[in-house]
Amino acid sequence: MSDKFYYLESLETIELEDKKSWLNIHRVGTWSHPTYKKVEGSIEKFTKMIENFENKIIGRDVPMDSRHGHGESLGWVEKLKIVGDKLMALVAWTPLGEKAVKERIWKYISPEYDENYEDKETGKKYGPALLAISATNFPFLTKLEPMALSEDLEKDEELMKLFREKKDREDVKLTISEGHLRILNSIEERDWETITDEELTSVLERGDLTHPQKRVLDQIICLPYPNEYSCRLKSPGLFQAGSFRRTTRTSDGKTYSIIMGRLKGQTTMTEQAYRYGKDTWDASAARGHCERHEGNFEA
């Protein structure tokens, strides 16, 4: 009998790159299941599952479907890999799958695998094998990072809530949505509501971040604080995920912040936006500086 395991994947936040997405389908841990009693995830299990996937031991491609085989194909699994304590699957979406992601028809995914797959002809057993990934609205296991369709950072209205509150420049107080806090906590458990720019930069320099994690961190860096004027030089959607950094510079004795990142396909840093603290800059001076740099000013 194949074992089905359910992971929370909020469709607030899948990235579609060339009509493909990396999905978090399992993680290290132990859970109690009402049918299978004990569900375990381990690096050893994931490694064997990847080996069996690459050797095509089930004799067919692994589908991404809906309602556990009772719906049409949404996509096909092309690759598996381990990232930190998570098992990731690269899914190539069908046109129906793309539509389902964009319209948020399904909210969660449910990977289905056999703990000890047995070849029906030879009787040989291979260990854990991925059989399918299904879209569902009834998850069992939770606390995995959400998936997001976020083709451009400024289109994600939910993330604008991140900077709804701010006490002062040194003490940032964020209001973080549950879905995005889940992404942040999948990086590490900490007080994300009071994180500083320097601490954000340190987190971004880690080498094990997934694409959704990078996107949320990017948006925390890119969105202006309520006590800042903003000058947009380029759309953040033109930049590589996880490449943004925030630094400072002075002009006429006044300090302002610079958001920089790497444009897609490039290796050098390019300025994306300026931020002017309202305690130092008045609107007229900030607007003038922004216009001299051919930016779009936002008071």
Image (tube, rainbow, N blue to C red):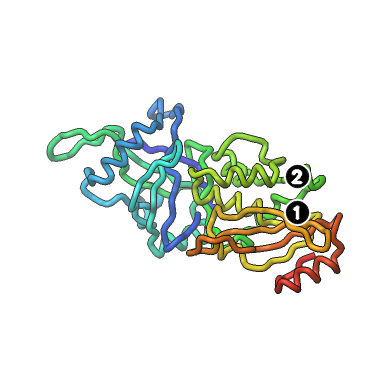
Tell me, yes or no, if residue 12 can be seen here: no
Distance of label 1 from label 2 (alpha carbons): 9 Å
The residue tagged 2 is 172
How many numbered dots are placed on residues in this image?
2
Q: Quadrant of residue 39?
A: top left
Front position in the image: 114 or 137: 114
User: Residue 43 — which label?
Assistant: none
| Residue 170 x/y as whole percent | 78, 44
Q: Are marks 1 and 2 in contact (CB under 8 Å)?
A: yes
Q: Quadrant of residue 73?
A: bottom left
**Of the residues shown, which amino acid type is indicated by label 2?**
Val
- The quadrant in which the N terminus is found is top left
Q: Is residue 256 left or right of residue 284?
A: left
Q: Earlier in the sequence, mark 1 or mark 2?
A: 2
| Residue 264 x/y as whole percent | 51, 63
Tell me, yes or no, if residue 133 can be seen here: yes
Name the residue rendered at 36%, 41% in the picture: 112
The residue tagged 1 is 225
**Of the residues shown, which amino acid type is indicated by label 1?**
Tyr
10 Å crowding of disc 1: few (<14), some (14-19), many (20+) = many
